[in-house]
Image (cartoon, grey):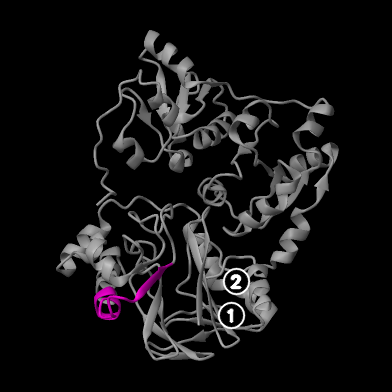
Amino acid sequence: MKVEQMYTGCLAEAAYYIESNGEVAIVDPLREPQPYIDKANAEGAKIKYILETHFHADFVSGHLELANKTGATIVFGPTAQPSYAAHIAKDDEILELGNIKIKVLHTPGHTMESSCFLIIDENGKENSVITGDTLFIGDVGRPDLAVKGNITQDVLAGYLFDSIHNKLLILPDETIIYPGHGAGSACGKNMSTETIDTLGNQKKTNYALQTKSREEFVNKVLTGLVSPPQYFPKNAVLNKTGYGSLDEVYKNGMKALNVIEFNIAAEETHALILDIRVPQTFAKGYIPNSMNVGLDGSFASWVGTLIVDLNQAILLVGDESKIEEAITRLSRVGYDHTLGYLSGGIEAWKQANMPLETVNSISADEFVQIFDKNPEINVLDVRKKSEYDSEHIIGAENFPLDFVNRNLSELDNSKTYYLHCQSGYRSMVMSSILKSKGYNNLIEIAGGFKALKATNKLKITDYVCPSTML
């Protein structure tokens, strides 16, 4: 028997490859099917099942693509009602895979169809359990994403308490826990950077498993939750109802456009120009009204947070060797309408004498000198509220990138703003968005809070435990 976690750091998402005697089950696959197909082929095995722990909100799962290409059966837990062919398993149903068994455990709470998959090895031992978004390392799934009708977040949290106590905590302490996400995912609030643990250790260390009553559990789990990214419900719908072919997405997105073609496409389709270069390179020269979301960061989740329309036409600018990767990562969160990319990148744009914008970016030391002379300047800390609450420059205002679309009216475009995040990634994203909206008096601080703190010349608030850190 082989159980392998296939972890994607930029999404903080874990898929799983389970194999026994030439048969394979893939759990919660990403959008692109080929890595799973290639892995099974390399092992001389056949994909039999595609197991879905629930209708995911934070990414578009690859179950449909993978089923179409392999003939494997898609399996959901009880109460799931997908709009396509799938096996809806009963609670405690046993799936045979080679010489092992996989037991379906219905664990509502994160969503009503949420299920875990208990792996029973060749000797009949309960070896491990894939917990999806029901139980994480250090946390449990948030119960506020599937609120509907009379099913409130309190009701869901109560279901989650019952599921964990009646289905998971009764398993042997040595049972291995394989969760659906790790730290960085918005599907929980206190996830560990570790992505595998034993149930026994989680009983000792997971705050949510220390609760003695349902009421205490509900209160702790719901305290400190922030609004989920706007794309979450949209991705959940795609996972339930279906989506288009990834092959077609690549075909449309991989079109190399010269400067004239690119310009025409931008004007005729009102496409968003998405520049995927690193922040400081972007700052030195970019196509006017571009949005910078660097591919080297949490690209997909920030695109999903900030670009409201999943059907938004997108044109890409960046290193041509990374365009396919960008299209793949866009598709993972449901953005399937890339129209092409600028052939030759920004250098081709420059050579054609087309207009360029820049972002005024200064070093941490330069900022300190300015701040010393005038501590009343407007400083925007664009990190998450929990980061700001932890420690920040005295006098800085928290203006999280996550909610820029909602809070934009709070800014005055006649004022000058100094922007920083933790390291410089998010502040450049914010700068690009604000400049496209007519906020031109912006100064971005390279290196972010990390560089500012390292100067040892600024007053920083004492550490205060954020409400999300329980």
Choose top left, top right, bottom left or bottom right for residue 116: bottom left
Q: Residues within 10 Å of mark 1 (few under 14, many from 20)?
A: few
Which residue is at the front of the view, 246 or 128?
128
- Amino acid under disc 1: Tyr
According to the image, label 2 marks what residue?
242
Proximity of marks 2 and 1: CB atoms separated by less than 8 Å: yes
Magenta region includes residue 361: no
First along the sequence among labels 2 and 1:
1
Relative depth, front residue between 61 and 365:
365
Tell me the quarter of the picture where residue 165 sits: bottom left
Q: Position of residue 193 (x, y in %)?
A: 40, 54
Element at label 2:
loop
Q: Is residue 114 visible?
A: no
Q: Residue at x 33, y 42 (%)?
A: 386
Specify the label residue 84 is tagged with: 1
Task: Calculate the distance from the C-alpha at mark 2 to the C-alpha at mark 1.
Answer: 7 Å
Residue 271: image x %, image y %?
69, 44
- Total marks drawn? 2
What amino acid is found at the position of numbered circle 2 in the picture? Gly
Q: Which residues are magenta?
A: 164-179
| One can see residue 438 in this view | yes
Q: In this rendering, would 450 be left or right of 324?
A: left
